[in-house]
Amino acid sequence: MDISYSDPLEPLNRLVFAVNEMLDTIVFRPAAVVYGKVMPAPAKRGVRNVIRHLSLPFTFINDVAQGEWERSGDTAQRFILNTMIGFVGLVDVAEDHGLPHRSTDFGSTLASWGVGEGPYLVLPLAGPSNIRDGAGLVVQSVADPVDIAFRRADLDLMPLIRAGVTTVDFRYRNLDTLDDFKANALDYYAFIRTLYRQRRAFEVDGGQEMYLRGKQDNEDGEYAYPPPRPDFSRAKPSAETRPAK
């Protein structure tokens, strides 16, 4: 059986997917629209930079766990540089010094250790995943150094705020893309399932994060690119597979 369409938990997954879509419709998409209208472009760019910066300590841990010594060194240099002269990540000065942003997670680490992805799984709020990557999210929730530092400083709400800001920023950058997917996919659930698997295969193999095509801020020119569209979409296929900056 083609693993791309193997979904033994499909009835449950479709139920969770529908609930997530309802929450997106009434909470996350409206919040993203307001965020896009209220926040000036330089502020949105700064938010994005900080989100990426805060992900670097856990990325470093996973780089080391995967035996990616050169990449772990680049990650450490990027974190130190942006912390010291980039106003704690608000400005991405490391990019100009030849240290582009890369990301990995514990799901990718498990994959590097030979752990299979397991059945496709839709998680409440978190969305498309699988058993392996879901386990990775659980580990991240308790082992992310930044969140641990927040909790030790009695800033228990900061991990939730961080997750919320990350979600709204991602949703804003993909407003048009997701609207297009919903309008053109014959089966939106199946479309997202295939898109997720293609994206995760790219991330696990390439060690780089990849997003849907994002909105562009005029002065930073940032785009992100999706993998090819599944064949059952009404939209024309795309062959773009470039990772995010």
Image (cartoon, grey):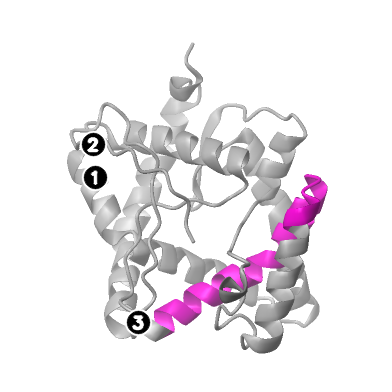
108 left or right, relative to 173: right
Q: Earlier in the sequence, mark 3 or mark 2?
A: 3
228 left or right, relative to 206: left
Rendering coords of residue 101 (x, y %): 58, 63
Q: Which residues are magenta?
A: 43-71
Q: Please rate how many residues cluster around mark 3, counting C-alpha atoms within 10 Å: few if below 14, some from 14 to 19, many from 20.
A: some
Q: Residue at x 61, y 38 (%)?
A: 205
Rendering coords of residue 127 (x, y %): 47, 47
Identify the residue position indicated by label 3 in the image. 41
178 left or right, relative to 45: left
Q: Is residue 63 above or below residue 108?
A: below
Q: Is residue 214 above or below residue 109?
A: below
Q: Amino acid at mark 1?
A: Lys
Mark 1 and mark 2 in contact? Answer it, CB < 8 Å.
yes
Query: Is residue 48 found inside the magenta-colored segment of the image?
Result: yes
Q: State the separation of the CA atoms marked 1 and 3.
A: 26 Å
State the SS at label 2.
loop
Q: Residue at x 42, y 68 (%)?
A: 168
